[in-house]
Amino acid sequence: MNDAELTQRTEQVLAQLADWQLSAEEVVSLLGLATEIKPRHLSSYFNGERALPNAPELQVRLEHISGITEALATTFPFSAQMRLMWLRRPHRRFQQRTPLAVILEEGVEGLQKVRMDVDCAYSYAIADAMAAAQQAKSSQ
């Protein structure tokens, strides 16, 4: 990914995260960059002055964040408030934790769990891939 694409992706994902109304510390934690970016420097990323690092794990996180955001926009197309409420309300599927808590506490795995819950197309793709892997393993 070149610098222009990285800057554009940074702006896009940070705009999505702005809708989640997170603290700077939560954003840095969610991105897995607590050792690389100080929360007080986050505004330079939001303003497009800097791009996020082009690290493989970060790209996975960004993909999940975008997928969650898009799925929530599909589920609640007319209400940003409902999207935010969904992220912050305890769910039985997450042992009465909020999806946001699952994401912040479990990192990439938490992002994937939340995305699988809210994005049925992604969940089906994962289930199909797991079934294919199991079938390939059993046929060896």
Image: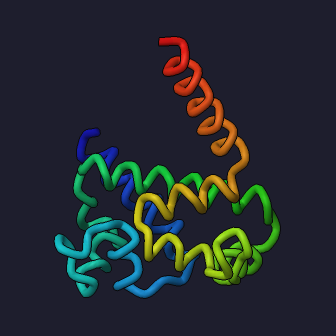
For residue 88, side relative to residue 40 (left or right) = right
Q: Please say if 3 is above or below 39.
A: above
- Toward which corner of the image does residue 29 lie, by quadrant? bottom left
Give residue 4's position: percent from left, percent from top: 29, 46
86 sits to left or right of 68: right
Q: Residue at x 59, y 39 (%)?
A: 126
Q: Foreground residue, 56 or 74? A: 56
Relative image position of residue 40 (x, y in whole percent): 25, 87
Residue 41: where, in percent of width, then height? 23, 81
Q: Quadrant of the N terminus?
A: top left
Q: Quadrant of residue 33?
A: bottom left
Q: Nearer the viewer, residue 137 or 49?
A: 137
Whole-percent x, y for residue 5 in the image:
34, 44
Asked if residue 1 is positioned above or below residue 82 in the image, the reply reads above
| Farthest left residue in view | 36
Residue at image coords 36%, 72%: 46
Residue at position x 26%, y 59% in the image: 51
- Which residue is painted at 54% across and 83% down in the image? 21
Front-most of residues 88 and 46 = 88
